[in-house]
Image (cartoon, helix red, strand yellow):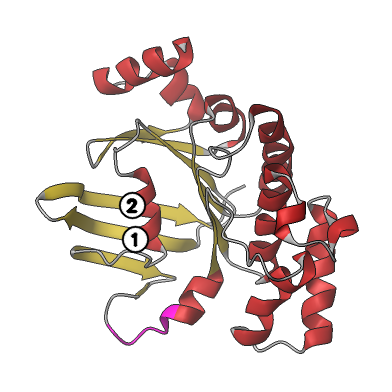
Amino acid sequence: MLSDEVIVEVRHLSKSFGNNVVLRDINFAVHRGEVVCIIGASGSGKSTLLRCINLLEKPDGGEILYKGQNILDGKFNTVQYRSRLGMVFQQFNLFNNHSVLRNCTIGQIVVAKRPKEEAERIALEYLEKVGMSAYVNAKPKQLSGGQKQRVAIARALSMLPDALLFDEPTSALDPEMVGEVLVVMRDLARSGMTMVVVTHEMQFAREVADRVVFMDQGVIVEEGPPEIIFERPRMERTRMFLRRTLAS
């Protein structure tokens, strides 16, 4: 059962890079406990939307509401806000000179101001959850891509966020490593974690999402439950994209 509580809401969001309009009048909300998968061709604006939500890109117009407050009004603490919305990147973004455990505690200590012992206890709990507790002393260069991404997920979870944002979390992985990351993400979804996932993994979106959002050329073309989007899409652009994607 999804909560009525809206964690993040985007209203009339726009973003351009020079003359290239990447997002046009995006309206989008995420409820607590909801798993939203954003699909679409490369260059459709999916990752830019995620990066705007997390303020890694500054929108040109519109509002981003976090629990009803507009985070673009200049009064919001951006660092604290980002700590409430964990981000998992394509390229892991781990600190290569720190151990796995330190990667998962540094944000807790510096941003959340948790004592080291508490930070380590929380980090170990989530490293166990993603199957990486045996690697606490390893450095990222000693890990496979799939292991690095699982550490990145544990690091994001260790901040105890309201939601996790995933930006194509399997696209940099070798095919045999994709499954181990998707298993972790499926478990998180089942546990009730609020998740927004930009993905090319159509089977994952079909099985796990509460809602699928299809983007094309900077706009949300269509959104709805996966059984509607995948089986009975209303828009021709959605049908064409799925025909191309599912046939490949």
Q: Relative to 142, say whether 235 is above or below.
A: above
Residue at the farthest right position: 134
Q: Residues within 10 Å of mark 1 (few under 14, many from 20)?
A: some
Q: Residue at x 61, y 29 (%)?
A: 207
Residue at the farthest left position: 19
Q: Relative to 132, say whether 209 is above or below.
A: above
Which residue bears the numbered disc 1? 52
Amino acid type, callout 1: Cys
Q: Relative to 247, say whether 202 is above or below.
A: below
Amino acid type, callout 2: Thr
Q: Residue at x 64, y 32 (%)?
A: 174
Magenta part, dominant SS: loop
What is the span of residues highlighted in magenta in the rendered image?
A: 74-78
Mark drawn on residue 25: none
Q: Residue at x 63, y 63 (%)?
A: 156
Query: Where on the picture, by quarter, is residue 65?
Result: bottom left
For mark 1, give the secondary structure: helix
The answer to if 148 sits in the magenta stretch is no
Query: Where on the picture, by quarter, is residue 185?
Result: top right
